[in-house]
Image: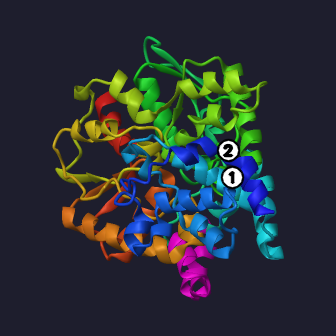
Amino acid sequence: MLKEALIEKLDYNELSNCMRCGFCQPACPTFRETGYEAASPRGRIALMKAVADGVMQPDQDFVDQMNLCLGCRACEPVCPAGVPYGQLIEQTREAIEEVQEHPTWVKAVRKVAFKHLFPRQDRMYRLGSMLRFYQKSGVQKAARKLGVMRILPKQLGEMEAIMPEASGTGLKKRFGTTVIPAAGERRRRVGMFHGCIMDVLFNETNVNTVRLLTEAGCEVVIAEGQVCCGALHAHSGEREEARGLARKNIAAFRQADVDVIVSNAGGCGAMLQEYDHLLANDPQWHDDAKWFAERVKDISELLVELVAPETWDALPQSKRITYQSSCHLRNGMKVTKEPVHLLQSIPGATYVQLREGDRCCGSAGIYNLVQPEMAGNLLNEKMQHVAATQADILVTSNPGCLLQMKAGIKRAGLEGQMEAVHLVDLLARVQKKAAQ
């Protein structure tokens, strides 16, 4: 029964800490879009508590409202009581997943993705090799020419159209070693969290991350045995699978004996930084999880700390740059100023503030695939604000956000006028010149 599962999983004290003040409502994208109390963090917490208290039965409407949440956590910074809403929604989804009966095909897809693909980096690399063959062999061109993409759901077709060049070669093979020395005197021993999707679809961003760090005086360690961070699992109710992945990552980076664990993906970084909460009830792993979580930093934090502003060279031409913040980087890792500081440090670039750049773009992991209508509405509004900046470069710090922004540029007809890039890749452009 869902009620019993909720009582077991939910942190009831945190449910009770919600003061029903409503400060979360203006920050919540789904409340703003629908105007429904139940589609706000306050409303969802009230529903959780009502079910746990036996006041209402958890019906399909209850499940639908929990699934409609983006998990962007924009409600957390504005909550005066400090309610960890992100943890509550994940606990609720874990309870739902425990009792929910999916159609056979959904069960099969979830099992393949969450148990047999994302946790196995070797399989992710094989998938990357197949995608690369699809892109480079002429199959992709033929499929597009024949209109095959039109039979796919709209959101999948949009993602295929902007999919970056895949790689079946991870960081370890790219550098030929697991330890890349610092350029000059070593200032930090940094563990590089390469991610599962990042090392396949954004491998060049990972390579650029290592190069930025080594130039900044970091010895970079690609910890062997690291796996997916578990964020997609936790957001989808597969928290036990996420715990298993967390234990593997903690063991890998403990063995690597690093000072700092760096992430270049906001979604991954936020998950890594909360391993101590994820394993709070595991006495065997909690101390190690705390050690791990305390060392996780975003790449932008390290670069601001270690790299002097005058290090960056100018872009080839004067550019207008704007920034779409990653929700989990901002609301989870609490990193807000560092990316903007780095962008403003690039000589000759004009930084343009994006209106509501702190509001979710609708990507939210796989949200744009499972909730395409809401995600599409959020993206359309976002692109109106993006277009108003008249920027040449739209920067973000998370792979899902980057793909969503690329899709938005295409949808808004801004191709040729604007490009979307990861913060790391933009900095690599100016760092390479500065290092010559």
Question: What is the magenta segment's predominant secondary structure?
Answer: helix
61 horizontally vs 311: left or right: right
Q: Residue at x 24, y 45 (%)?
A: 315
Q: Which residue is disc 2 drawn over?
A: 228
Query: Which residue is at the far top?
Result: 185
414 horizontally vs 107: left or right: left
| Image location of residue 153, percent across then percent down | 59, 82
Q: Which residue is disc 1 drawn over?
A: 233
Seen from the viewer's position, the closer of residues 151 and 435 is 151
Q: Which residues fall within the magenta stretch? A: 135-160
Seen from the viewer's position, the closer of residues 415 and 246 is 246
Above or below: residue 349 compared with residue 154? above
Q: Residues within 10 Å of mark 1 (few under 14, many from 20)?
A: many
Q: Quadrant of residue 137?
A: bottom right
Query: Mark 1 to mark 2: distance in Å?
Result: 9 Å
In the rendered structure, which disc, 1 or 2, sits on the residue that comes first in sequence?
A: 2
| Image location of residue 51, percent across then percent down | 66, 61
Q: Amino acid at mark 2?
A: Cys
Q: Amino acid at mark 1?
A: His
